[in-house]
């Protein structure tokens, strides 16, 4: 089925994804604290986990996601309970950056599984 390496990668990605969701769910009301938590997570990820090209995906997600959200919010599609800038929380670009990297990393794992 899966090699040990692929299982390890998949479990790590799921754990990191879960930590990100839990952090946002628990601390969304405190924009500064959540921003600091996500920044620390990103710095940790750069040092120990991310590949070089993950940074490009992070930046694209951190810019593109919030732009789309600002447009949708301005058209009344939804709103955040604790916005700080342009109707979005200050931590949202970090969350979008993480999401872009996570999608990329999961896709890479599934490609490895498919090629086996």
Image (cartoon, rainbow, N blue to C red):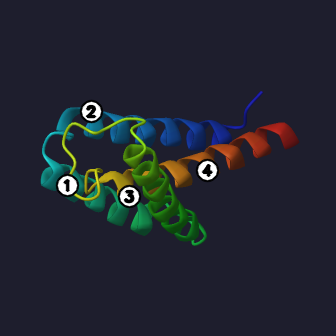
What secondary structure is marked by label 1?
Answer: loop
In space, the residues marked 2 and 4 are separated at their CA atoms by 22 Å
Label 4 residue SS? helix
Residue at the farthest front position: 75
| Residue found 34% across the figure and 66% down from its top | 43
Number of marks present in the image shown: 4
- Occupied quadrant, residue 20: top left
C-alpha gap between disc 3 and disc 4: 18 Å
Q: Nearer the viewer, residue 44 or 68?
A: 68
For image coordinates 60% across by 46% down, the residue present is 103
Q: Nearer the viewer, mark 1 or mark 2?
A: 1
Give residue 4's quadrant in the image.
top right
Say which label, 3 or 2, has the lower sequence index: 2
C-alpha distance separating marks 1 and 2: 17 Å
Residue nearer the viewer, 48 or 76: 76
Labels 3 and 4: the sequence-earlier one: 3
Quarter of the figure with the N terminus: top right
Q: How many other residues sit within 10 Å of disc 3, few (<14), some (14-19) or many (≥20)?
A: many
* Residue 11 x/y as whole percent: 53, 35
- Disc nearest the viewer among 4 and 1: 1
Q: Are marks 4 and 1 in contact (CB under 8 Å)?
A: no
Q: In front here: 39 or 65?
A: 65
Earlier sequence position, callout 3 versus callout 1: 1
Relative placement, left or right, of 20 versus 96 is left
| Picture quadrant of residue 101 | bottom right
Residue matched to label 1: 84
Identify residue for label 4: 105
Circles 2 and 4, Cβ within 8 Å, touching? The answer is no
**Residue identified by numbered label 3:** 93
Q: SS of the residue at dot 3? A: helix
Residue shown at 69% from the left, 45% from the top: 107
């Amino acid at each position: 089925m899966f090699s040990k390496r692929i299982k390890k990668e998949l479990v790590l990605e799921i754990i990191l994804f879960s930590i990100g969701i839990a952090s946002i769910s628990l601390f969304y009301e405190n924009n500064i604290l959540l921003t600091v938590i996500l920044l620390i997570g990103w710095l940790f990820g750069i040092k120990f986990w991310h590949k070089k090209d993950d940074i490009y995906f992070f930046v694209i997600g951190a810019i593109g996601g919030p732009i789309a959200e600002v447009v949708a919010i301005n058209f009344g599609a939804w709103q955040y309970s604790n916005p700080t800038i342009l109707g979005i929380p200050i931590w949202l670009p970090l969350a979008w950056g993480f999401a872009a990297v996570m999608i990329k990393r999961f896709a890479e794992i599934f490609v490895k599984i498919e090629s086996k």
